[in-house]
Amino acid sequence: EVQLVETGGGLIQPGGSLRLSCAASGFTVSSNYMSWVRQAPGKGLEWVSVIYSGGSTYYADSVKGRFTISRDNSKNTLYLQMNSLRAEDTAVYYCARVLRTWNGSGSYPYYYYYMDVWGKGTTVTVSS
Amino acid sequence: DIQMTQSPSSLSASVGDRVTITCRASQSISSYLNWYQQKPGKAPKLLIYAASSLQSGVPSRFSGSGSGTDFTLTISSLQPEDFATYYCQQSYSTPPEGFTFGPGTKVDIK
């Protein structure tokens, strides 16, 4: 069964650090694009970061320079290292697999991207 | 950056109703549009990708249409399990700009 399980959330003081983990089963993390998405209490979904199968990483402006996405191929696990945490980082953090499908026309952008498998999420609360 | 809007922000409907949710992009995104369903306390679930392709296992009462800047998600006959919040997401502008989500449309019971 294809599954993602996030761990590592908790209560942390402003300025602190936390590392989230996302353990995958049923597929290989390193062969896929993987993403983190967060949801602040009562708010909508916000894309946070992505790591491509080739290793390239990208971040939302709101977390750039503070968060780092990575993976451990031997553990088939995705990570999100969060430093210099702020109150506005309080959210449920989801990891998701990002599938891409060729658009069939050869025109740019060449692929459709969509998040087909999601974990249940882990809650991060930044508060003193 | 591409901005996504949804309308309405919420709606009340009855079981059996036909429901339509609209998503608009700030610039043309061709058919690079996904729809997700989220129930309270649960992770989002992919419903539709590439504007109109039904994800495997999703009931056929869900359908998506549109291209360019205007898109719709239609539920042909609302079922009790469909009461949830629905989000659109563009994938035309990939990272570093990111996979932008719309603000969501909450569908509740009339």
Image (cartoon, rainbow, N blue to C red):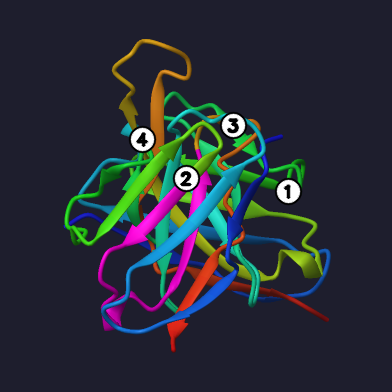
Which three-letter amino acid code belongs to the residue tagged 3?
Pro
Q: Chain of mark 4?
A: A
Whole-angstrom CA distance, mark 1 to mark 4, is: 23 Å
Q: Which mark is residue A63?
A: 1
The magenta span reads: B71-90
Q: Is residue B22 above or below residue A126?
A: above
Whole-angstrom CA distance, mark 4 to mark 2, is: 33 Å
Could you tell whether B109 is left or right of B103 in the image?
left
Which three-letter amino acid code belongs to the residue tagged 2?
Phe
Whether the residues at callouts 1 and 2 have beta carbons within 8 Å, the answer is no
| Residue B76 placement: quadrant | bottom left
Marks 2 and 3: which is nearer the front? Answer: 2
> What crowding class fits label 3: few (fewer than 14 Cα within 10 Å), some (14-19), or many (20 or more)?
some
Residue identified by numbered label 3: B95
Viewer-proximal residue, B63 or A20?
A: B63
Marks 1 and 4: which is nearer the front? Answer: 1
Residue at image location 38% in from the left, 40% down from the top: B51
Residue identified by numbered label 2: B71
Could you tell whether B68 is left or right of A26 in the image?
right
Which three-letter amino acid code belongs to the residue tagged 1?
Val
Q: Is residue A52 above or below residue B20?
A: above
Query: How far across and down, in percent of the image, does residue B13 sit?
Result: 41, 81
Q: Is residue B19 above or below residue B108?
A: above
Q: Is residue A76 visible?
A: no
Q: Which mark is residue A44?
A: none
Query: How far across and down, in percent of the image, does residue B78 sit?
Result: 29, 74
Residue identified by numbered label 4: A30
Mark 4, secondary structure of its residue: helix
